[in-house]
DNA sequence: AAGGTGAGTGAGTTTTACTTACTAAAAATG
DNA sequence: CATTTTTAGTAAGTAAAACTCACTCACCTT
């Protein structure tokens, strides 16, 4: 989870932010809150993190690492490309449901600051997203997926569908039926909604 | 555009924020920046808007109003439900491309504050989103759209696809090919990406 | 034992969102 | 036409938040 080699203060800070984000949004959580919750001084936070957002991205990175590890494992059993895509949808929705703080960070806190896109957290996400594109291209090669469609567009539709299907449930703390959402998304995107 | 009955100070404030958001994110724009750009004092901003985010939502509301008006117009010609959905996709992508500040606000600035969801801007969006669901249900009734799929899930996939297809282009100021993106999204979602 | 290093402190400073008490002009009222 | 009220706007301030910096203390290393 949190790298063991971190000094106790750093660990406490990361843990504190994660816990505070459970019920509150990032902007409303103050450095002073984090320091108090962690039982350290504000100054120490700036020893380990260059600023408040940097702290957020470091915490996020921990989660993404775990997430990508799980996705990798979930993909092992799948043979067909469509099955692999479905496994990714399932892993993503499952992960958003299980780790709602992580979901909130990724879906609502992170985008609105340009420096996210040069963070390590973002690099990890880029790797993941690149991987999805590879699976789609592989599916086109082995004739599971139509070669008349733009692979990047397919990926965007898939990723957008996952996010949109979860975001309101995350924001309003509603239940997520992982299997149902996964089936819905995949049925729609794999087979289309047109009757004929 | 901006309601003519507004006093000049208010108009200048709204215009100032809109102009500042062209190159910067909302959090990095300060009240002082807005006041300076508008040529008014900070105090005046708080005469017309209860707080910084309220100002954002009011500016956003102006745009959404125009957007919904355009969507309504674009829907007039369409007969089939799928054509209507395609018209909505086109309108949305066109609007994001044409009004990038509006797109930024909707896609990246707005979500991360709980009070957005009780704003008038959000009410308008809800109306729009409800309307999309009605079109889908109508399509199911007239047998254009499969009745085996969850209508709400279809809507989420559609909305997610639109957003995801545009968001990176908005953030990184890249070109958007409205027709191409519209065709890609509709081809994928209407017909599915599975070969068989 | 001396010196260096990493963990942590606490008292600042600066910035920023927001408040409040005020003015001057225009509009409504009698 | 005089007076009250409303509207548009200002200027100076406050409180809280993010961030800085000079410092201490404990523990290695040689």
Image (cartoon, coloured by chain):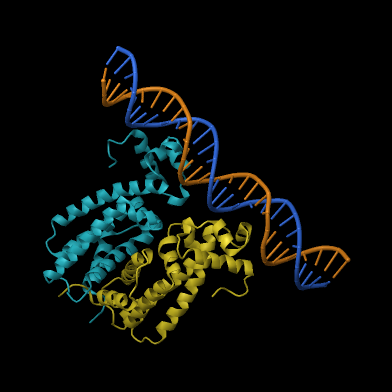
Chain colours: A yellow, B cyan, C orange, D blue
Q: Is residue D13 above or below residue B112?
A: above
Residue at the spot 15% in from the left edge and 65% down from the top edge: B81
Q: Is residue A58 left or right of residue B98?
A: right
- Quadrant (top left/top right/bottom left/bottom right) for the C terminus of chain B: bottom left
Where's residue A26, x and y in %? 47, 59
Where's residue B113, x and y in %? 40, 56
Residue at the spot 35% in from the left edge and 76% down from the top edge: A89
Indicate the quadrant where residue A152 lies: bottom left
The answer to whether residue B133 of the structure is visible from this angle is yes
The mark tally for this picture is 0
Residue at the spot 34% in from the left edge and 78% down from the top edge: A85
Q: Is residue A19 above or below residue A52?
A: below
Residue at the spot 47% in from the left edge and 79% down from the top edge: A69
Where's residue A72, x and y in %? 44, 81
The answer to whether residue B173 of the structure is visible from this angle is no
Q: Is residue B115 left or right of residue B80?
A: right
Q: Is residue B88 above or below residue B121?
A: below
Q: Is residue C8 left or right of residue A164?
A: right
Q: Nearer the viewer, residue B5 or D5?
A: D5
- Quadrant (top left/top right/bottom left/bottom right) for the N terminus of chain B: top left
Indicate the quadrant where residue B131 lies: bottom left
Q: Nearer the viewer, residue B79 or A145?
A: B79
Indicate the quadrant where residue B128 lies: bottom left
Where's residue B124, x and y in %? 26, 53
């Amino acid at each position: 989870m949190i790298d063991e080699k971190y000094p106790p203060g750093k660990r406490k800070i990361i843990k504190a932010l994660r816990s505070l984000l459970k019920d509150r949004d990032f902007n409303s959580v103050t450095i002073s809150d984090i320091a108090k919750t962690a039982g350290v001084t504000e100054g120490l936070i700036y020893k380990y993190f260059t600023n408040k957002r940097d702290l957020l991205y470091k915490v996020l990175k921990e989660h993404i690492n775990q997430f990508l590890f799980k996705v990798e494992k979930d993909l092992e059993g799948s043979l067909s490309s469509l099955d692999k895509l479905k496994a990714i949808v399932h892993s993503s929705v499952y992960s958003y449901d299980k780790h709602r703080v992580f979901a909130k960070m990724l879906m609502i806190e992170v985008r609105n600051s340009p420096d996210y896109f040069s963070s390590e957290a973002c690099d990890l996400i880029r790797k993941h997203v690149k991987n999805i594109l590879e699976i789609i291209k592989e599916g086109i090669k082995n004739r599971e997926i139509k070669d008349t469609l733009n692979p990047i567009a397919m990926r965007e539709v898939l990723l957008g569908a996952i996010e949109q299907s979860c975001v309101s449930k995350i924001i309003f703390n509603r239940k997520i039926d992982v299997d149902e959402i996964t089936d819905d998304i995949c049925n729609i995107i794999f087979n289309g909604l047109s009757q004929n």
